[in-house]
Amino acid sequence: MAQQLLEVRNLTIKFGGLVAVNDVSFGVDAGMIKALIGPNGAGKTTIFNIVSGVYKPTLGQVFFKGVSIEKLPQHKIASLGLSRTFQNVQLFGNMTVLENVMVGCHAKFKSGMIGAVFRLPSMLSEERKIREMAAARLEAVGLEDSASLPAGSLPFGKQKALEIARALASEPDFLLLDEPAAGLNSAETVEIGKIIADLKKRGITILLVEHDMGLVMNISDEVVVLDYGKKIAEGTPREIQNNQAVIAAYLGEDIEQMV
Amino acid sequence: MKKTLKSDYGILIAFTALVSVVPFMLANKYYISVLIFVAINMIVAVGLNLLVCHAGQISLGHAGFYGIGAYTTAVLTTAHHCPVWVDTLIAVALAALIAWIMGTPTLKLKGHYLAVATLGLGIIMHIVFNEWEKVTGGPSGIVGIPGLSIFGRGIGSDLAYYYLFWSFALLTLLVALNLVKSRVGRAMRALHGSEVAAAAMGINVSGYKVKIFVLSAALAALAGSFYAHYVTFISPTGFGLSFSILLLTMIIVGGAESVWGAVIGSVVLTSLPEFLRGFKDYDVVIYGFILVAVVIFLPAGIIGGLRILKERIGRRGTAESA
Amino acid sequence: MFKSMRVLFTVMLLVGVTFCAVLLSGCAPKQKKADEAYKIGAILSITGRASPIGQPEKETVELLQEQINKAGGINGHKVEIIVEDDAGDETKAVMAAKKLLNKDNVLAVVGPSLSGTTLAIVKLFEESQTPMVSCAASVKITDPVQKWIFQVALTDRYSIPNILRYLESKGIKKIAFISDSNAYGQSGLAEMENTAPQKGFEIVAKETFGGEDTDMTPQLTRIKGTDAQAVVCWGTNPGPAVITRNMKQLKMTIPLIQSQGVANAKYIELSGDAANGVVMPAGRMIVTAQLAENDPQKPILLEYQKAFEAKYKKTPDHYGGHAYDAVKLIFKALEKVGPDKALIRDEIEKTTNFVGIDGIFNYSATNHNGLSEDSFEMVQIVDGKWTILKTK
């Protein structure tokens, strides 16, 4: 068995009286694409937010590369090599496309205020590297022509691609993708699918939340199904498609047909 | 928005040249003293521009830090015979320390809550200046603050103050321009755009917020110390909410999209009331009218208006050549 | 990029050039006619929170300018009084002073209205050797005496002995002092603490209130619990009126003494019935009608009030009176010695027995506030009207 890059153990979180995630455990092996699916309100994005450090769990633990990270602040987790995108795109609209990706490189570099104010040689050479790295990432998602546009002015599909480029800029080992295909047309969805598959080829492990079952079943190695905050199934796409509990959770919808 | 640091440097050099020749073009000392206050206000406004316009954190309490600078200088030099410049250093350090202590809990707040918290901060400091009579002299203030000196020689003329304060103002500007176009500056602007996304990129959001808050408070205190040394008298009236609001007006009217907005804002809002003195009783009305007009017709401030103008001229230029 | 730089460069230069052009054009023509009129400056808080003080001062200054020019000016020269607004702000006062001193080259300045704005610019007048006659009341303005700085307003130094003499005549030795937490209240408290113990009085309670407070019963209740025989209140409207009403509500029967700061109609209006019986020191303007016919101030008071009412259709107050005295002192000196700042200063310092609105002025090298204890009358409010008390 491959080494587990991420492991979630007995995760529980309560908001007031509501138990949003209830005793969920699963692992993600290095190099795989794992999908987290379930009806709306099942707790998928909440798990993303716990793993990336936005929320602190009420109970349970999160291990990343064997280290317990559930108590670390968000930026520390990010600098361990865990990056993410957001369900409703969270770009820095006040900055250019290139600058967005340059911010993505933040965790990889060190220069601080003193270096910036005096424009020390070390800072300038870092700055050059950041610019080169960011430009390369933009090229990888086909946005090099839009580099100097304000990020907010891009069409939605390109914003999604930009978010992925930004998340990749820090060269993460692990990527959380929150509904990468939401709001995209079918051509754009195919495009995003290609980008994700390409990431896997480059050795990046991915945890994915997605409603587009076609995309999920095509690219995932394993799927975890959540319902009302509980894990109701885990397995390969084929196993999940035949799982009675899953079918019931989707209110009798025929998953075969959705595919 | 696309401006590179190189073009910023170009403008900065031109601006510096302008600043250095202006005194020779002015007929008398009165205008120089107006420009001295422009320089003092610019130091605060540039710091506040970084905090508000770039890092997206509102502060309604910066007059308090300005006041801490002025009062530290006043108290140290009058009651404790502290040598000049040493008092300025202590003033800046004290304001930075207070900003650091206050900033850590305060900057966790967002939007209206942060506005109210910083408002409270400013009001508390104003109350301290007013009520801590034994030290601050209470409402009647502190008289007899010594002027600045360089290498033991007192600065007598306004012209010397002009060059001294403008050197600091231009340095502040250079620091701010450098900072914005750097890893730190991008982190700052990123947390303005989206805090959660900034944190997901490995940016220590609260750390950067506190850093920039401390920097802007330190700049405010530097300006406050200069003010006290230049005017040689201070009382609490100049360090209340109305000055905090004037500072915010400077950066908004000047334009929030770039550090240059703070420059234009402090020039316009400090010198405009002086130009309008000629209108006698109507000066306040005209002043208000100009501010409202800027906000209505130039929502991105004066700098935004200039940018749009430049883009239009640029477009016409390319159309003609095509 | 080069192009954008060039465009912005041009814009910056244009802005700079216009800036300078405006500055230059603003002053060039004015210097030509410098020798025609005598120029005097005035720095007053016409707008802002102190406008109730600065506005009547400005009206008075304009009234006097009109009068003197109608009468042919001073020694054949017209008088131009350049009025600048400082909005009660010290930075603005500094800029206004720089303008008057450097651009308009005035011979002397009336004002500022407030102690803070005065203290902020004292240094500039000393440096530029220009006489200033401040309308503000802080003792600090003329103590220690500074060569070029004079003051016309009645200060606490002269009102407090009047109060103490009144209290003594009533056999009162123990007083409670309640003061506004502004510069005025603070200075009254300091002066009272200096003077009262020397004269055998005991301050048994000290309380403060904020200018915006609308209820002072907690402070008054504490005072009620002491053996104070009278309450002395130091503040400006509206706080003292609140205290007056609260004392009546608390059924406190010990006498209430107010300061000269509320010797105006507004105080009676705000206090209502509760004002009756309140005693305070005041300049003579509010009791002009009751003054003896041979009182030297009476003709001047009547003349000022008549002229002010004719021009502005309202009654003047003691703030306008300060400006009146300051302007008249400068006019008098100017008439005698002509347009020379140093001689004007010397002439003001030599002033003796100059009858003004605030009192009879006697300046000297050691006294730059020309008034004395005699400038005050102790007055009592009876049926909503001011009545002179005979204590002397």
Image: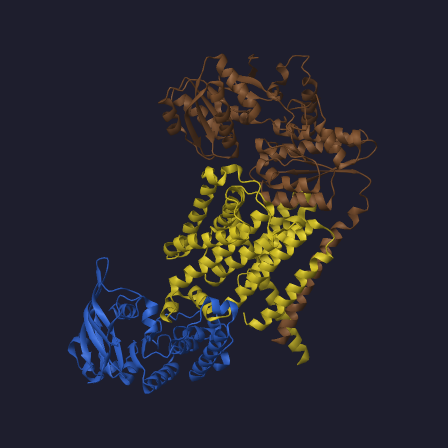
Chain colours: A blue, B yellow, C brown
Q: Residue furthest bottom?
A: A201
| The residue positioned farthest toward the front in the image shown | B152
Q: Nearer the viewer, residue C101 or A84?
A: C101
Quarter of the image where the C terminus of chain C is located? top right
**Vertical comparison of B39 with C384: above or below:** below
Q: Residue C340, position in %: x, y?
A: 78, 36
Which one is in front, B119 or A113? A113
Q: For this rendering, which residue is in front, B90 or B251?
A: B90
Residue depicted at 41% across the width and 21% down the height: C248
Q: Report which quarter residue C91 is drawn in.
A: top right
Left or right of A196? Residue C336 is: right
Residue C369: x %, y % from top left = 63, 28
- Observer-nearest of C265 and C236: C236
* Residue A216, position as x, y percentages in the image: 28, 81
Q: Is residue B43 visible?
A: yes
Question: Is B217 on the left or on the right of C319, as rendered?
Answer: left
Q: Could you tell me which quadrant the N terminus of chain C lies in? A: bottom right
- Where's residue A111, x and y in %? 44, 71
Q: Is residue A206 left or right of residue A155?
A: left
Q: Is residue C138 visible?
A: no
Q: Is residue A52 left or right of residue C353?
A: left
Q: Is residue C315 above or below residue A55?
A: above
Report the number of numbered marks. Answer: 0
Which residue ends up furthest to the right in the rendered image?
C76
